[in-house]
Amino acid sequence: MNDTAILGIIGGSGLYEMPGLQAARELSMDTPFGKTSAPIVIGILEGTRVAFLARHGLGHHITPTEVPYRSNIYALKSLGVERIVSISACGSLKEEMAPGHIVVPDQIYDNTHGRARSFFSEGLVAHVSVADPFCRDLSNQLESAVSDAGGVVHRGGAFITIEGPRFSTKAESNTYRQLGMSIIGMTASPEVFLAREAEICYATMAHVTDYDVWHVTETPVTVEMVLNTLHKNTTLAQNAVRSLARNLAQKRDCECADALATALITRKDAIPPTTRQKLDLLVRKYI
């Protein structure tokens, strides 16, 4: 069986499977950073080999803080994935980004505090560039796919990631608005940064489920509100992924594939053998 894929789909709240995969096969994967959130399902979608992973596990039992982000990205890298589309729920911090709309952000603000943010430690240091954290090329393709699927899509905006699992206070929500944030969620970071360290293109299809708690004429966000909107958008998300898989460009038109070329700073002979082995998948072409 062929266990490789070029497109990874990470499903968040409300999207736990990807129907329509042909020749699908389920893989239980372990990595140097532990097991993945759930088994990864490999299959063919619209002619493209795809790997689907449920971020919060089957049955949604993993909190945003507990998601094994490094394991998930490492496993997708080991399968040959070159591009990742993250599907996630978010709250809107702007009037025009209404519930039911899709946002494909171009910036992120990391406001988390309890997560491992990098693959690099234990004697191997890398300073990866993330001035533009989301892959422009893949984000453009994703925007077109959402539009083709009939969604109302907003291109660009800053995505603030909070630790969770609680929702924001009104004071926090209004502060984020004053800082110029567009949407708010709990899982984009460190996922986007780990993808860059793994030299994988990364884009987010963020489903607006609510107005967080800042909007004076709207009910504050609840789990029921989130799930109701996501349920309505499930078909849209699946159709957008199909469109992306069907029209995915053959070659990557970005710099993501060489993100580590100027990032590694540790002298080669100073890298501990165990660390070198652990990170071989990521750094072998450089050291």
Image: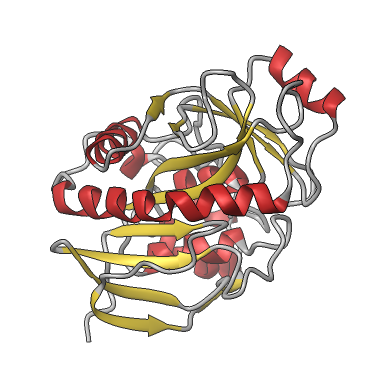
**Residue 194 appears in the figure:** no
Q: Quadrant of the C terminus?
A: bottom left
135 left or right of 165 in image:
left
Residue 86 picture location, percent across and down = 45, 50
Q: Name above or below for residue 208 compared with residue 15.
A: above
Q: Name above or below for residue 277 compared with residue 244.
A: below
**Residue 150 appears in the figure:** yes
Closest to the observer, 127 or 274: 127
Closest to the observer, 239 or 125: 239
Residue 23 picture location, percent across and down = 21, 81
Q: Quadrant of the N terminus?
A: bottom left
Residue 151 picture location, percent across and down = 34, 37
150 left or right of 93 in image:
left
Location of residue 148 by image quarter? top left
271 left or right of 179 in image:
left
Q: Residue at 38% x, 75% y: name it.
A: 41
Location of residue 170 by image quarter? top right
Total marks in image: 0
Closest to the observer, 228 or 254: 228
